[in-house]
Amino acid sequence: MLLLRHCAASSGADGFPSSWTWGAVIAVAALLVGTWLTVSHRRQDRTVRWLEPGYETAGTVLIVLNRLSLTIAVEGVTSELPELVDLVSKLRIAEQRSPDLPFGTVIAALEKYRTHALPQDHVARLAEDGALLADHLALAQAQGVVLEAARTATVQVQRAIERRTRH
């Protein structure tokens, strides 16, 4: 209370204490705003650096899935299947780093896709028994469905990361 009376008594015509000027008030406000912006941007940069490996891995997964969509996956023949194992490992690391992002959905879809790969000797089996054609067609159709589910899950992860890192 005593401080307010002192300030009121020593204030000039503008309502500021005699030791304050408009320039000092503007400088303090600029300092506060600048500090807030610096802290905010550093926090945002830290978040971007933290989520970047997961985002890049999701982008690589989309590229591999696009290549896989051009053909039917066959165990031991399709060259992208071993690459999926590496990508699943990277996605598991990203999931551990950011458990609140839906990396688990992508991992589950990719593992399910690998289980729907046609056996390496599928052509010889079809030549022996034509009744297996329906089974092989069902596997190929399941591959397409799971492939699209994996794509959708990957895009959702990327969008969630983009929402968090948007400036």
Image: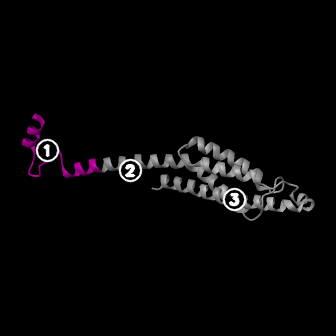
Residue wearing tag 2: 37
Q: Which range of residues does the magenta coloring cover?
A: 1-29
Element under disc 3:
helix
CB under 8 Å between callouts 3 and 2?
A: no
How far apart, in angstroms, are the residues tagged by discs 1 and 3?
68 Å
How far apart, in angstroms, are the residues tagged by discs 1 and 2?
29 Å
Residue wearing tag 1: 17
- Report the coloring of the rendering: one colour
| Residue 34 x, y percent position in the rendering | 35, 50
Residue wearing tag 3: 65
| Residue 120 x, y percent position in the rendering | 86, 54
The residue furthest bottom is 70
Q: Nearer the viewer, mark 1 or mark 2?
A: 2
Name the residue type under label 2. Leu
The residue furthest right is 128
Answer left or right for 27 relative to 88.
left
Earlier-in-chain disc, 1 versus 3: 1
| Residue 29 x, y percent position in the rendering | 27, 49
Identified at 69% across, 59% down, the residue is 65
Q: Nearer the viewer, mark 3 or mark 2?
A: 3
Answer left or right for 115 relative to 7.
right
Identified at 91% across, 59% down, the residue is 124
The residue closer to the viewer here, 32 or 110, is 110
Earlier-in-chain disc, 1 versus 2: 1
Name the residue type under label 1. Pro
Name the residue type under label 3. Leu
| Residue 41 x, y percent position in the rendering | 43, 50
